[in-house]
Image (cartoon, rainbow, N blue to C red):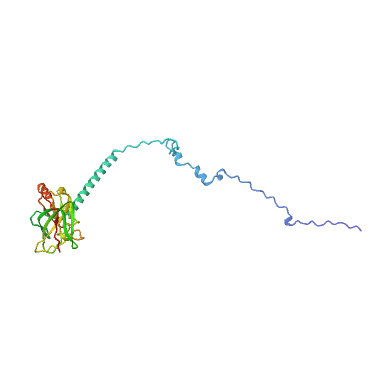
Amino acid sequence: MNVSSRPQPETRSQPEDRPRPETRSRPETRPRPEDHLRPETRSETRSRPEDRLRPEDRPRPETRSRPGAPARRRTAARPSRWRAAGAVLAGIALATAAVGLQAFGAEIADHNAPLTSTGAINEEVTGSRISARVRAVHAAKAITAMKAGEQERVTAKGIFIIVEVAATATWEPQQFGPPRLLTAGGRRYVASDRVDPMSTITHSYIQPGWWTEGVAVFEIPPGELPDSRILLAPSSGFIVEPNGPEIEIDLGLDETAARRLTSTAKDVYELASRN
């Protein structure tokens, strides 16, 4: 039996079996030359202000000298006339200021100076709170005085000058500060601290109404005695008293009198103790 072959129906290809259309690739984009430049490189390619300058106007790079090369000396610029005039004016101003400060300091010293009353030996000299008189002046090579119940002897390195003083207060009790001896050369000698103060005028209180007597003892070189004066002032304690009272009395010793006094100085002068 002959079996006739029938044509089989054509099978349709499924979607995935269909040939896909050929996709064309995009042409490769070539990078532009400026895309290869970095941002900082672009900024460097810009013209700088100094590039626009002429070669002779461009700043020259700093040249460092080699260790062995000799250093070049720069010629110092000459100061202008205005600068020299300014220096002269500044010097004048400083000199004027120095003179002004000196005058101001002298004026302050004058304001703080004591109010001095002057006189001569055997004259009564009155200050604002006290009056004093010098009765006599003695010279000695040594001094003896009672101290702690025993007699003490002190020998002078130069010469002792003993000034007899009498004083009275004006309205309230006063006490003398350390007396001073003013020489013709302007030196001031404070009363000797080698003598017990209890034996001098500084120990007693000066009462108003009657005179208190005592001595002031100085130790000085014999050559300082001519034309010397004694300075007496009330004690103000630890308080600095501007324009305080001061009494200045001339001892009446010229060159001849001073030489006579020192040549006849006593070997020992005995001080009376004061209670």
Point 11% across, 57% down: residue = 164
Q: Position of residue 59 (x, y in %)?
A: 43, 39
| Residue sitting farthest toward the left | 123
Point 21% across, 51% down: residue = 105
Residue 154: image quadrant is bottom left
Q: Nearer the viewer, residue 101 or 75?
A: 101
Q: Nearer the viewer, residue 243 or 100?
A: 243
Point 50% across, 43% down: residue = 44
Residue 65: image quadrant is top left
Q: Is residue 129 above or below residue 84?
A: below
* Side (left or right) of 190 relative to 40: left
Q: Position of residue 6 (x, y in %)?
A: 85, 57
Image quadrant for the C terminus?
A: bottom left
Q: Is residue 202 visible?
A: no
Image quadrant for the N terminus?
A: bottom right
* Side (left or right) of 88 relative to 126: right
Q: Is residue 104 above or below residue 168?
A: above
Q: Position of residue 196 (x, y in %)?
A: 18, 59
Q: Nearer the viewer, residue 55 or 199?
A: 199
Marker count (numbered)? 0
Q: Nearer the viewer, residue 192 or 238?
A: 192
Q: Is residue 137 visible?
A: yes
* Side (left or right) of 159 relative to 4: left
Point 51% across, 44% down: residue = 42
* Side (left or right) of 83 relative to 129: right
Q: Position of residue 143 (x, y in %)?
A: 16, 56
